[in-house]
Image (cartoon, rainbow, N blue to C red):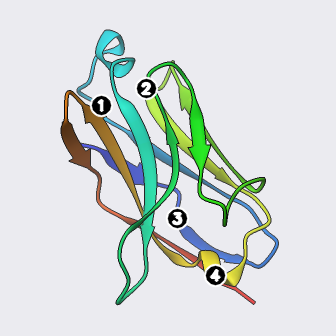
Amino acid sequence: VQLQASGGGVVQAGGSLRLSCKAPRVILSEFWTYNMAWYRQTPGKQRELVASITTRGTSTYADAVLGRFAISKDNSRKTVNLQMNSLKPEDTATYYCKWERNGNDYWGKGTLVTVSS
């Protein structure tokens, strides 16, 4: 499964960005069988989980983004989105999407988010 992540960029603190992750070759009936998540990583640090959503639509968030970020699935586009609001400089990182099914993880290339103060 090849994942394509997009939506990163430069934004001022307090602004918003929307990240998207899609797998063009995945058919809709398979789309529902993946658990999906967004991670982020800064240089010298471990990759950390930001938000996840299960096949049943249950979402979880890291404490640092709770109330500001929202993960969702777009069935028509077969994508998983991460809406990021009230961005802070500490949200600056490379963001990665991950799809998981049957214990197999599939990672997209990162998309860089830079939040300026």
Badge 1 marks a residue whose secondary structure is loop
The residue identified by callout 2 is: 78
Query: What residue lies at 50% left-to-right and 46% top-to-bottom?
Result: 20
Amino acid type, mark 3: Gly
Query: What residue lies at 54% left-to-right and 26% top-to-bottom?
Result: 74
Residues at marks 2 and 4, CA–CA distance in whole angstroms: 29 Å
Which comes sooner in the sequence, label 3 or label 1? 3
Badge 4 marks a residue whose secondary structure is helix
Label 4, residues with CA under 10 Å away: few <14, some 14-19, many ≥20: few
Label 1, residues with CA under 10 Å away: few <14, some 14-19, many ≥20: some
Amino acid type, mark 1: Pro
Residues at marks 3 and 4, CA–CA distance in whole angstroms: 15 Å
The residue identified by callout 1 is: 24
Report whether 116 appears left or right of 67.
left
The residue identified by callout 4 is: 90
Q: Please report contact status of discs 2 and 1: CB closer than 8 Å, yes or no.
A: yes
Residue 69, above or below 71: below
Amino acid type, mark 2: Lys
Amino acid type, mark 4: Glu
Report whether 17 appears left or right of 3.
right
Residue 53, above or below 19: above
The label on residue 42 is none
Displayed quadrant of residue 66: bottom right
> x, y (%) of residue 102?
20, 27
Badge 3 marks a residue whose secondary structure is loop
Displayed quadrant of residue 115: bottom right
